[in-house]
Structures are given as structure tokens and as C-alpha cells.
Image (cartoon, grey):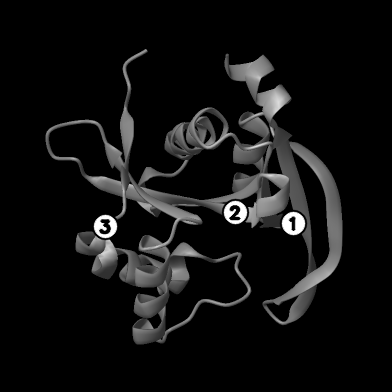
Amino acid sequence: MKKRIILSLASMDDVDFIVDKKTSVSLWPYEDFVSSDKEAVRNNVIEKINSDWYKQYIIRFDDHERTPIGEVHIHWYVKDRESWEIGYCIFPEYQGQGYCVEGAKLALKYAFEDWNAHKVVAMCNEFNIASYKVLERLGMLKEGVFKDEFLWQGKWVNQFFYSILDSEYRKIYL
């Protein structure tokens, strides 16, 4: 199957693009808080780009234009346990076409094959059906439910906790 997307590691040239996306409430409808303080978000993005614990990628079409269609990030969750956390966002016009799964698979590949992760985890709002379907398509298993984990749209909602171990990844992908 032809590769449809690539991940490009975020650089300082991508900061404004990332800040615009991170502060767009419409892109994060299931999050409990999206900051409108672009300067604070900008400082945070720059700190993460310059870190060794946070990897921010732009999901792009694998063509000559390299059109950005989303982002995926993966960072240490518990370093001593070699666990990482993954998160993602696909722009609305590209949702429902498998791009998020493809981008997240590439990030999992990096985590398990390049960084020797033992475990990758992800969390999502119980109402974010598309997100937990992505996680399940990746082979991640729901390990638990954090009850009333955060305030969303004026009410306390649950958060699902998913994970995949390196041994599970190898069975599925290698």
C-alpha cells in the first residue's frame, strides 16, 4: 500500500503553525481547557521542541506539497518505567479517512523501535468516540476509566485510559 502521509518533526519554523492549532478551540472539542494565551502556548511549544522528552510531529501528505493535515505528539509519561504518552489531532476536513491511525502508527513505531519504549499510553474523554476508535484500531487496550476526571462542558466526565506494551506492539506490527 502506498504511503499517504509522513511525519515531520516540528522545528522552530513550525512554532506559529503549532500555536495556532493548539489554541484553536474547534480542534480540541473534547479537551477540558484550551488556552487562548498565545504567548504562553508559544513559550510552551518552544520549550517542548527543544526538549528530549517531547516529540511533536506535523502529519503531512506524502506528496510534493507536503500539506499539513494534523499533528501527533508523544512524550515521556513515566521515564523510569520507559512509558510514553501519545496524543493527536487531525484537521476536520481530513477526519474519518484513516490519516490519524496512520500518523499514530508511525509515532508508535518510533516509540517502540527507536526509543525502546516499554509501554505507550493514551487518554481520552469518554465522549470522544473517534479518538478511542483510533486507539483501538492501533491495537491499544482500554485499561481503565478515570471516573469524573475532568470538568467538560460544565459537567464532570470520565476519561478512558488505553495502553499498548512493546510485546503487544511486536505481535501486531512486526
Identify the element where label 1 is drawn: loop
Q: Residue at horizontal 68%, vertical 29%?
A: 166
- On screen, 167 above or below 52? above
Q: Amino acid at mark 1?
A: Glu
Q: Position of residue 124 (x, y in %)?
A: 68, 56
Identify the element where label 2 is drawn: strand
* Sequence-first tag of 2 and 3: 3
115 or 15: nearer the eye?
A: 115
The quadrant of the rendering that contains the C terminus is top right
The residues tagged by marks 2 and 3 sit, at their Cα atoms, a distance apart of 19 Å
Residue ranking furthest to the left: 64
Q: Position of residue 101 (x, y in %)?
A: 51, 35
Q: Amino acid at mark 2?
A: Trp
Apparent side of residue 85 relative to residue 141 in the rendered image (left or right): left
Q: Which residue is mark 1?
A: 126
Mark 3 crowdedness (10 Å alpha carbons): few <14, some 14-19, many ≥20: some
- On screen, 152 above or below 40? above
Q: Which residue is mark 2?
A: 76
Q: Residue at horizontal 19%, vertical 61%?
A: 13
